[in-house]
């Protein structure tokens, strides 16, 4: 049977405060305790460990080498306990323990990261479980009750959603691709002989094919990043998310295909709440963060 620890995190917190504050009196003031109780906590801690942790240095109390090493190991435990207590307080106030989000891969990553930073600041005690999906993968996550909200390319039947922004696709290929060698405006039949790369729908209930699929040869990959690499390597052409290839276009590693029609495609992205009437404050906070960042991106664009 495992023995209980001889020391407590409270004792280590008192020790940490004495070191940070510079002395017993200052620590007592910060902890709202008597100086004698602060002194007793450290005396008891040292007795239980059988080692000196603090020594006086002028008017300050400083750690011994052993105290410095041990407190460094205790510090992460103290931080974890503070987070645990904060999370318990959040749950007591009605905040969810966890929020589950499905995000279509077309949603711009910088926009998503900005929203998540704001969410983390507002809901530090709420865990986030994120599903990265493609096309009908968001539908599946909603229908199967796997998520509380989703950023999806369509609002599935039975749900309500709000438009966030439009994802822009640009037809492009590597500079040395034979399509560029034609040196003229391209027609759809010019594309037919060449390989097109598309991203696989991650849904399983009713997977979809979207976009122009007239090429005789098609390569299907699971991630947009892989499609970008395939196109840049010269193996295929594709309609790629404009936000994901901006740097490559600027550097000339990818070149837009001069199509007479259809060079640019747009797909709407919507925010869908799984059950708006039962959404908790953390889920609503995340929804607000996504709306705000999408609005900022629309304004900047």
Image (spheres, rainbow, N blue to C red):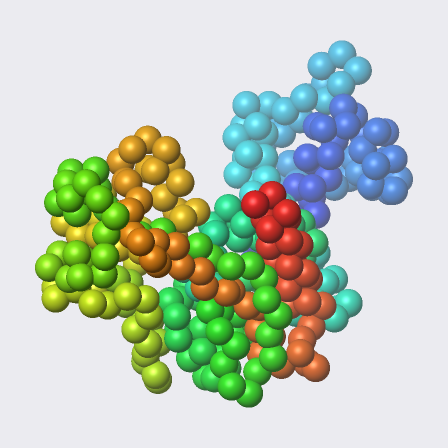
User: Which residue lies at the image location 76% right of the left edge and 12% below the top edge?
Assistant: 58
Give the number of marks. Answer: 0
Counting from the top left corner in percent of width and height, residue 263 is at 34, 54
Quadrant of the drawing holding the C terminus = top right
**Left or right of 295 on screen, residue 209:** left
Question: Which residue lies at the image location 47% right of the left edge and 50% below the top edge?
Answer: 109
Outermost residue to the top: 58
Relative image position of residue 78 (x, y in whole percent): 63, 46
Left or right: 290, with 200 as reference point: right
Residue 146 visible here: no
Residue 28 pos. (x, y %)? 84, 36
121 lies left or right of 204: right
Look at 31% across and 54% down and name the residue there.
260
* Image quadrant in which you'd find residue 15: top right
Residue at 52% over, 77% down: 155
- Say if 232 sits above or below 19 in the image: below
Depth check: give the residue in front, 186 or 119. 186
State which quadrant residue 85 falls in: bottom right
Give the x, y percent position of residue 271.
57, 68
- Near-viewer residue (259 or 123): 259
Whether residue 75 appears in this view of the structure is yes
Quadrant of residue 223 within the rendered picture: bottom left
Q: Nearer the viewer, residue 123 or 247?
A: 247
- Position of residue 136 relative to residue 258, above or below, is below
* Residue furthest bottom as drawn: 158
């Amino acid at each position: 049977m495992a023995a209980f620890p001889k020391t407590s995190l409270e004792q280590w917190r008192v020790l940490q405060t004495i070191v940070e504050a510079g002395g017993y009196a200052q620590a007592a003031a910060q902890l709202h305790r008597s100086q004698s109780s602060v002194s007793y906590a450290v005396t008891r801690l040292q007795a239980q460990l059988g080692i000196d942790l603090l020594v006086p240095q002028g008017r300050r109390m400083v750690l011994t080498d052993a105290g410095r090493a041990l407190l460094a190991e205790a510090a992460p435990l103290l931080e974890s306990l503070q987070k645990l207590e904060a999370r318990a307080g959040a749950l007591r106030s009605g905040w969810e323990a966890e929020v589950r989000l499905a995000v279509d891969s077309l949603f711009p990553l910088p926009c998503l990261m900005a929203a998540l930073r704001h969410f983390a600041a507002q809901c530090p005690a709420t865990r986030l479980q994120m599903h990265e999906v493609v096309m009908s993968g968001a539908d599946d996550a909603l229908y199967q009750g796997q998520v509380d909200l989703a950023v999806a390319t369509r609002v599935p039947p039975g749900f309500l959603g709000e438009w966030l922004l439009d994802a822009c696709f640009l037809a492009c290929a590597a500079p040395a691709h034979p399509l560029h060698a034609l040196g003229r405006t391209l027609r759809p039949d010019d594309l037919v002989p060449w390989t097109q790369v598309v991203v696989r729908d991650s849904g399983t209930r009713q997977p979809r094919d979207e976009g122009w699929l007239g090429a005789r040869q098609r390569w299907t990959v699971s991630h947009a990043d892989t499609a970008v690499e395939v196109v840049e390597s010269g193996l295929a052409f594709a309609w790629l998310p404009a936000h994901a290839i901006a740097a490559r276009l600027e550097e000339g590693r990818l070149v837009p295909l001069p199509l007479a029609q259809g060079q640019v495609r747009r797909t709407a992205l919507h925010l869908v709440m799984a059950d708006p009437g039962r959404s908790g404050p953390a889920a609503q906070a995340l929804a607000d963060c996504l709306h705000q960042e999408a609005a900022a991106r629309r304004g900047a664009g």
